[in-house]
Image (spheres, coloured by chain):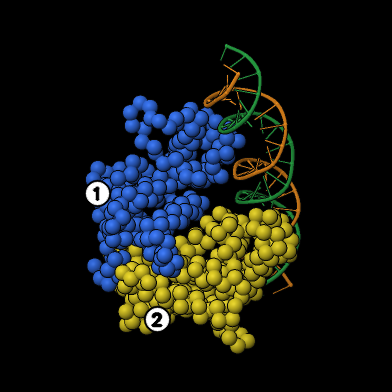
Chain colours: A blue, B yellow, C orange, D green
Amino acid sequence: MVTGTATSSEMTDTVVAPGRREQNKLDTRRAIAASALDLARAHGLGNFTADQVAAEAGVSRRTFFNYFHSAEEALTTTTDALLELAAAEFMARPADEPLLDAMIAALAAIAKTDNLSVCGELFRMAEGSPELMRSQLHAWERAEARIGQAVSERMGGNLNPLYLLALVGAVLSCVKAAMQVWAAAAENPQDGSAAELEDQIVGALSMLRDGFNNPR
Amino acid sequence: MVTGTATSSEMTDTVVAPGRREQNKLDTRRAIAASALDLARAHGLGNFTADQVAAEAGVSRRTFFNYFHSAEEALTTTTDALLELAAAEFMARPADEPLLDAMIAALAAIAKTDNLSVCGELFRMAEGSPELMRSQLHAWERAEARIGQAVSERMGGNLNPLYLLALVGAVLSCVKAAMQVWAAAAENPQDGSAAELEDQIVGALSMLRDGFNNPR
DNA sequence: TGCAAGTTTGCATTCTGTGCAACAAGCTGG
DNA sequence: CCAGCTTGTTGCACAGAATGCAAACTTGCA
């Protein structure tokens, strides 16, 4: 059960029928997420209800809960997309590339995400909101599982489990650290901001690769 | 407002008055946590209410919510204690010891925790319960902050922020991975289980120190 | 002893989260 | 184009979460 990763809406119509059903669902999902973000910006994080989000998104309260368990979870779609991208990038790396190189390249690509500034915003928001923090952490955890799966498959499944879990966890922790530093620095949607983030990510992962010997 | 870290209830009474107030609060807290664990074991994780926990702990529902936001959070006190211990152990390491050695030693000491088997149990429970998973992740996140603080102070505060965050995050990720592997293997409260956990932790952290070069 | 500070509790209230059944909208095949 | 199937939406109902508030009760201290 794979969540349909952007099936490249290239020309007009492709072989696979996207279907109006699928499309509508995606639209509502996006509408709800957008409304949640709006309200979070307007009223602050704990200061609005599921009712309000539903109303602003033009759906019923019940439908809101069909899509998300909470307002915070609705916000986390953005972060999820970012991590999904990382996983996709990783799987697209050439199979003969050394594992660590592939991971570094894939994760550096995170900086190319569309809603980068929103992700930074959410990172900052999460500092002051336990609920959002938990949601975000959970998103990273899910990504860890996905990427762990991908790494395992890439290596033919015969990897020491401890090595696998520790490696993927450590890598993602470094990326998280990079985003934290970057988000704290970039208060406003800067221009070259993406480049800065990429530097931070590569920097953190290089430290990891070197075994943290050199606290420059 | 520091949560009173076990102020060594050594002999009968010491100079600092623990105070009956403090003690009572700790007792209720523990009672609630214990009741939550009982009910989780008896009925499964989502299948009991705050009312029940309160009743079993001998307090009112309202008091339950004075201590915890949710049943899952009550369960997390055990994990919190484990991570608190790690932080304490780290701060007790000699100041001239190399940073990574100190961290490895401190985190290996986690295996000495009292409720080790309970921690493993919670780890396994969390796999099937998003709510508990989030709570646990949050606990690790808080520990990350605490330990990061300690590391920063130890190094005189002049550490590259990215290095600091990446290092602490990576280290804790490795420990988490170790506990995951260990918890998955140790279904029942084994005897030499603690030693196995310590091996896993040291193993994971050694990989980290070596830069994950060697996927044995 | 008696007051100040801190805790517990019940009550009221708002909001969350989910099951259910009716309804509507997209997707067949005739 | 219609009949019928599948899937998504909505309103309703209801148990439970979570929090403010004020009254009762403990503990600490002068």
Query: Mark number for residue A118?
Result: none
What is the crowding at mark 2: few (fewer than 14 residues within 10 Å), some, or many (at least 20)? some
Image: B128 above or below A65: below
The chain under label 1 reads: A
Image spot of residue B134 (x, y percent): 52, 56
Return the residue found at the far bottom.
Answer: B11
Report whether B85 appears left or right of A117: right
Which residue appears at 51% of the width and 80% of the height?
Answer: B195
Which residue appears at 43% of the width and 47% of the height?
Answer: A80
Image spot of residue A13 (x, y percent): 38, 27
Q: Amino acid at mark 2?
A: Arg
Image spot of residue A128 (x, y percent): 45, 52
Which residue is disc 1 drawn over? A195
Image: B166 above or below B20: above
The chain under label 2 reads: B
Q: Amino acid at mark 1?
A: Ala
Image spot of residue A8 (x, y percent): 36, 36
Of the two numbered discs 2 and 1 in the rendering, the one whose residue sits closer to the viewer: 1
Mark 2–mark 1 distance (CA, rounded to whole Å) = 39 Å
Image: B133 above or below A81: below
What is the crowding at mark 1: few (fewer than 14 residues within 10 Å), some, or many (at least 20)? few
